Amino acid sequence: MSKCLLAILFLCSFFKISYCQSGGANETSALQHARQLYVNTLSQQAGIYSGPDYLGYPHPVKDGHPFFLSAEPFKGEIYYDGIQYKDIPMWYDLAKNEVIIQRYDNFSRISLHPERIRDFSISGHHYIKIDEAASGRTGLAKGFYDQLYHKKSEVLVRRSKDFLINTNIDGVWVSFSNEKNAVFIRTGTEYKQVSSQKSVLQALGKYQKEIQADLKQTKIRFNKEREKAIIIMVAYYDELNSQL
C-alpha cells in the first residue's frame, strides 16, 4: 500500500474519531475536509482524471468553436463520482453535451463520464444534470441545464450548438452555429418553456401587471437581456407570493 494512501486512511480515521468525540456536530465539515484532502493528495491519481481522451472533431475547425463562452478553459468546480473538485481547468462542449477537463500535462484533455457528474460550475454558471429519472418526473430532456435561478421557483436554460461539416476545393472543415438557448420556468412542479415576455407572464400566471411594472422600472429591455429579465420577473413573482 502506498504511503500516500496510508496517509489518507489515517486522516480519515482521525476525522471519524474526532466526529465521535464531538457528538457528530462537525461530521459534514470533517468529511468534506477529508474528501478535499484526498483530492489534493492523490493529485494526478484522483478519479476525475481517469476518463477517456477528448477527441474533438474529425476535421479542422474553421468557423466558431463548440464550447460555452470561450474556446479557452475556465477554472471551475465539479461534483464528480461523489467528490467535489475545485479549480479544475474545464470546458463545456455544447455541441456534444460533454464536460471536458485539462490533464495534468496541460496539453491533452479528458471527456468526463456524464453519468458520474451531479453538477458543475463554470464562469459563474451552475449546471445541474437532468438524468433519466429526473427527465421522467419533469418532462425535460436529459442533459445539463444552466440553473439561473433557484428559490421557490426555478429558471433553467438548455444551451446547445449545432455543427456542420463543410466541403469545397480547399478541403473539409467544421463550422459551429451560434449558441441556442431554450429557457424553462418552474413555479410549481411543472416546467414550461418560454421565449418572449408574453410567454413568461403566461407561465407565471399571477401578478402580470405588477411584474411588468417592476421590470419596466429596472430599465432592462427583454429583447436585449432576455435571461436577466426572466430572472428579475421570476424573482419578483416569488417575492409577491411570499407576501401572502
Image: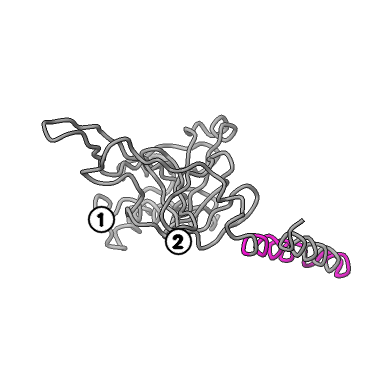
Within-10-Å neighbours for mark 1: few <14, some 14–19, many 20+: few
Q: Is residue 23 magenta?
A: yes
Res 91 visible: yes
Q: Which circle marks residue 48 in the picture?
A: none
Q: Which residue is mark 2?
A: 75
Residue nearer the viewer, 218 or 39: 39
Q: Position of residue 35 (x, y in %)?
A: 68, 60
Residue 205, visible in the rendered structure: no
Residue 62, by quadrant, is top left
Residue 182, image quadrant: top left
> Where is 20 relative to 111, above or below?
below
Disc 2 secondary structure class: strand
Amino acid type, mark 2 = Lys
Taking depth in this image into account, of 80 and 208 the one nearest to the observer is 80
Judged by its main secondary structure, the magenta piece is: helix
Tell me if residue 30 is in the magenta stretch. Answer: yes
Q: Which residue is mark 1?
A: 221
**Quadrant (top left, top right, bottom left, bottom right) of the C terminus:** bottom right
Specify the amino acid type for callout 1.
Arg
Which segment is the magenta one? Answer: 19-40
Residue 230 drawn above or below residue 160 = below
Q: Earlier in the sequence, mark 2 or mark 1?
A: 2
* Image quarter (top left, top right, bottom left or bottom right) of the N terminus: bottom right
Please, what secondary structure does the residue beneath circle 1 have?
Answer: loop
